[in-house]
Amino acid sequence: MMPVGCHVSIAGGVEKAPQRAKNLGCETFQIFTQNQRQWRSVVIDEQTAASFREQRKLMGFEQYPIFSHASYLINMCASDPDNLKRSRAALMDELERCDALGIEYLVIHPGAHGGRGEEWGITTIADTLKEALDKIAPEVTILSETTAGQGTALGYRLEQLAEIIRQADVRDKVQVCLDTCHLFAAGYALHSLEGIQEFWKKFDEILGWQKVKCIHLNDSLKPLGSRKDRHAELGTGEMGEEVFRYLVRKTQVPGILEIPNGDEAFKRNIRLLKSIRTD
């Protein structure tokens, strides 16, 4: 069965996140390693890193991997050369912080090509990933996240993710994070059992399920194929509960909630996921 958790605040310091995750009922969790709205890089000192690792152990989060989400400012195929350079530097900083904290996976959105075209964007993303992983070789795996396909964002088709991974050619250091809301918005019919099973089969054919290391569990406020990224609590949007019931029973890949309405919503939805794993 799927271990479940949510995205947790790092207010007051990253070392406080494991206790917060425990209080929310998490079995795994995801964080930002710094304020994701700023470019200025934060260096994790040895004391902070040691405290985070100790708290993770004390709170019982060593059984499953945990996750960091990269800053939304990073665009791995930015059309502006200066922004691309800054994004590549920020990605390497993200990897270094994850490595210091012992976080196994870094989730990142592939990027938006800004009108340069899909082919150029995919090649540039692959080059960005390869450059980062060639220069920095921590025990961290990058997870390229599926997107809703807003604007010129890439990663909304499975074929795009497969080509990014193929071109990056960095062995197993780039894998996949699925986001149920994004997939639904991109046109994958996850609101019916038939649609879920069809997607499952298609993903296995194009990428292989062994590449999925995290699943973001979010309902969608917007309808199927809207190409709009608007998360909702489970069962309150356009998708219903069937996909979440299927996933928590079908896979042992960790599931992370990224839903609105704060800590009480996280607690409520974590309880729901745990209940439908076995009912």
Image: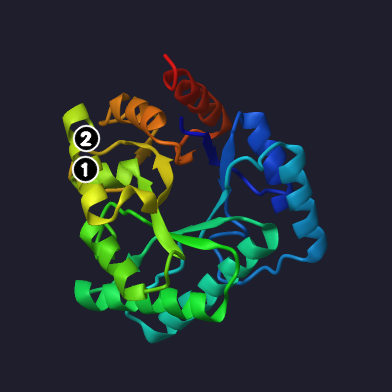
Q: Dividing the picture into quarters, in which one does residue 155 lie?
A: bottom left
Q: Residue at x 62, y 45 (%)?
A: 9
- Which amino acid does the dot numbered 2 rest on? Gln
Q: Position of residue 275 (x, y in %)?
A: 47, 18
- Which amino acid does the dot numbered 1 rest on? Lys
Q: Which residue matches tag 2?
A: 197
Name above or below for residue 228 compared with residue 41. Answer: above
Q: How is the image coloured?
A: rainbow
Q: Which residue matches tag 1?
A: 201
Characterize the local packing of mark 1: few (<14), some (14-19) or many (20 or more) Cα atoms within 10 angstroms: few
Characterize the local packing of mark 2: few (<14), some (14-19) or many (20 or more) Cα atoms within 10 angstroms: some
State the quadrant of the C terminus.
top left
Secondary structure at numbered mark 2: helix
Q: Position of residue 92 (x, y in %)?
A: 55, 74
The CA span between labels 2 and 1 is 6 Å
Decide if residue 118 is on the left or right side of residue 12: left
Do labels 2 and 1 touch, CB within 8 Å? yes
Q: Residue at x 60, y 59 (%)?
A: 35
Q: Position of residue 194 (x, y in %)?
A: 17, 30
Q: Nearer the viewer, residue 154 or 115?
A: 154
Q: Position of residue 55 (x, y in %)?
A: 76, 44
Name above or below for residue 49 compared with residue 136. Answer: above
